[in-house]
Amino acid sequence: MSIVSKFLLTDRVAVIQGAGSGMGKSVARALAEAGADIVAAGINVYDKSKTLDDLEAVAAHARSAGRKALTVAADVRDGQQVADMVEKAMAGFGRIDILVNAAGGSFAAPALEISDNGWDAVLRENLKSVFVCCKAVGKVMIAQGKGSIINFASMAGRASSAGNAHYGAAKAGIISLTQSLAEEWGPYHIRVNALAPGTMKTEGWVRVQTQWVGRPEADIVKNIPLGRMGTSDDAAGLAVFLASDASDYITGQTINLNGGERGYYT
């Protein structure tokens, strides 16, 4: 096998939860362009009426690339809906080779102002959703004897910041969960890795900036050696690598995606 062919995902099946927007959307499109059939899943928690339109746009892109695609409107925080998502994926394709857990979100608030419900909501949306999806798809991958799982953590899980205690704790949990599952499922040839994006210029970042007096973009960029904020496409490239045979000896890792950003994150 040539080195270039190891990056191809021809005829593999990828489930992407959180595929309707942001980094999940870019990853789903990139996986299809690399050759995978996709299941675009999730809900738009900010405007549920847009969910099917968001997912269908991703599926249409995959089909335009010559791939097959399904859409599943599923609240990935709910175990039964995740089970139904997996059932639909298996009915449509008969296998799941790649799982990408990209859904997530938060709100900015000082720790003393985070209610019990607010804490639970952020942990449920970011951490529980990853566990529930890994567990459901992991059973399929164990039966197959192979698979690649890619979790979206964050640099906030390595070194969080003011107004971010709940989100940082959730993302730190994803990093730990990634290591645990890699250890447990390695014997079944299932690789489990995570991405840790730094300050990425995504829809979510813009939304939080409007809620919380964050650092101006110019100040952020001054601390990034590469001279720019990250984009969803940066995450997509790394995800394709982790999904492919080119990363066949990598598991249990959380890879920083931050342009070398200094100071705010370490």
Image: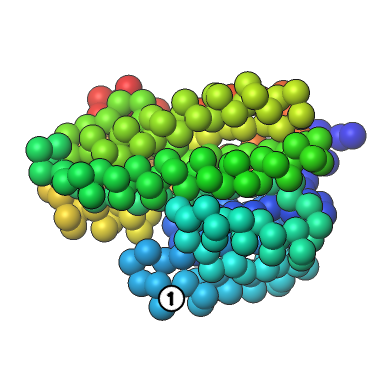
Up/down of 138 relative to 79, above or below: above
Name the quadrant containing residue 60.
bottom right
Q: Which residue is farthest right?
A: 1
In this rendering, position of residue 64 left or right of residue 111: right
Residue 221, horizontal then vertical, whole percent: 29, 39
Tell me which residue sits at (26%, 58%) in the image. Answer: 207
Name the quadrant of the N terminus: top right
Instruction: Please state the total of marks drawn on the protein image.
Output: 1
Residue 50, horizontal then vertical, whole percent: 43, 76
Q: Which residue is farthest left?
A: 112
Name the quadrant containing residue 181.
top right
For the residue pair 18 and 116, the one nearer the viewer reads as: 116
Name the quadrant of the C terminus: top left
Residue 149, horizontal then vertical, whole percent: 63, 39
Q: Specify whether residue 247 is in view.
A: no
Q: Specify whether residue 98 is in view.
A: yes
In this rendering, position of residue 86 left or right of residue 174: right
Tell me which residue sits at (51%, 40%) in the image. Answer: 131
Tell me which residue sits at (58%, 74%) in the image. Answer: 56
Task: Name the residue that disc number 1 marks.
Answer: 50
Q: Which residue is farthest front?
A: 80
Up/down of 207 relative to 53, above or below: above
Q: Tag 1, which secondary structure?
A: helix
Tell me which residue sits at (26%, 38%) in the image. Answer: 166
- Indicate the colouring scheme: rainbow
For the residue pair 240 and 175, the one nearer the viewer reads as: 175
Residue 197, horizontal then vertical, whole percent: 42, 38
For the residue pair 136 and 161, the one nearer the viewer reads as: 136
In this rendering, position of residue 20 left or right of residue 142: left
Up/down of 56 relative to 105, above or below: below
Q: Residues within 10 Å of mark 1 (few under 14, many from 20)?
A: few
Residue type at mark 1 is Lys
